[in-house]
Image (cartoon, rainbow, N blue to C red):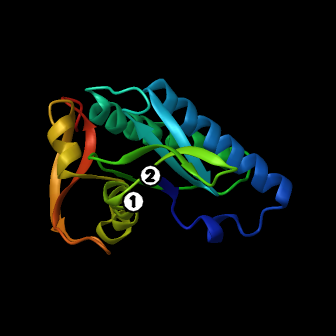
């Protein structure tokens, strides 16, 4: 899950046309990066992006790919903010939450409208991690299960152990800082 921080306040003065251009530019750039790392866009919810890695085609390196996509999204955001500044558009920041685990994956919905998606406690945790970034002042938070799969490919620091809203178990969380060997 990724989301623009303070989106409503940042964009409140934009005309509908400028808001559409702004959001479409942002979503297009982020989507290209996610897809280049074998991610699948599940849905957009306003300025939020929900993406899947490791489905519908199983990949052993899905945790690495998700973390690398998140890092590349942040890198691209720096370029986008330069573009937004030149276009007199608001500068933005994003928060990203990533979790790995057993999820229900497939076509879900009504008997008339189906959507390929995921659901379950592990999906909820990923969503919660995106929001928890606000509390810690971080940009990318991952669960311990994601960290265990990606630790050979990313530089990360342990942040805390949390019990996210609605969760029965505590989970160790980590901030992803860089690709392995690339941290300052």
Quick one: label 1, few (<14), some, or many (20+) residues within 10 Å?
many
At a point 36% along the width and 57% down the height, the residue shown is 120
Residue occupied by mark 2: 1
Q: Nearer the viewer, residue 64 or 138?
A: 64
Q: Is residue 81 above or below residue 45?
A: above
Single out the residue that lies furthest toward the bottom: 165
Residue 48 percent coordinates (x, y): 55, 55
The tag earlier along the polypeptide, 1 or 2, is 2
Q: Going by the image, does 5 lie left or right of 113?
A: left
Residue 7 percent coordinates (x, y): 60, 64
Residue 70 percent coordinates (x, y): 40, 41
Q: Is residue 31 above or below residue 91?
A: above
Q: Is residue 1 above or below residue 128?
A: above
Q: CA distance from mark 1 to mark 2?
A: 6 Å
Q: Going by the image, does 44 lie left or right of 86?
A: left
Instruction: Give the position of the C terminus as an image quadrant.
Output: top left
Residue occupied by mark 1: 130
> Which image quadrant for residue 86?
top right
Do labels 1 and 2 touch, CB within 8 Å?
A: yes
> Which image quadrant for residue 8?
bottom right
At a point 27% along the width and 38% down the height, the residue shown is 178
């Amino acid at each position: 899950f990724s989301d623009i921080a303070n989106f409503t306040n940042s964009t409140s003065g934009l005309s509908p046309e400028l808001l559409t251009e702004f959001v479409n530019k942002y979503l297009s750039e982020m989507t290209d990066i996610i897809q280049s790392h074998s991610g699948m866009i599940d849905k957009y919810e306003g300025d939020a992006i929900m993406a899947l890695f490791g489905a519908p085609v199983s990949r052993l390196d899905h945790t690495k790919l998700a973390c690398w996509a998140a890092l590349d999204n942040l890198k691209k955001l720096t370029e986008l903010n330069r573009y937004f500044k030149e276009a007199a558009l608001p500068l933005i920041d994003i928060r990203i939450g990533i979790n790995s685990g057993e999820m229900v994956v497939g076509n879900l919905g009504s008997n008339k409208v189906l959507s390929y998606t995921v659901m379950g406690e592990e999906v909820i945790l990923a969503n919660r991690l995106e929001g928890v970034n606000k509390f810690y002042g971080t940009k990318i938070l991952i669960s311990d299960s994601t960290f265990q799969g990606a630790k050979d490919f990313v530089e990360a620091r342990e942040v805390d152990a949390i019990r996210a809203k609605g969760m029965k178990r505590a989970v160790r969380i980590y901030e992803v800082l860089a690709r392995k060997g690339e941290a300052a």
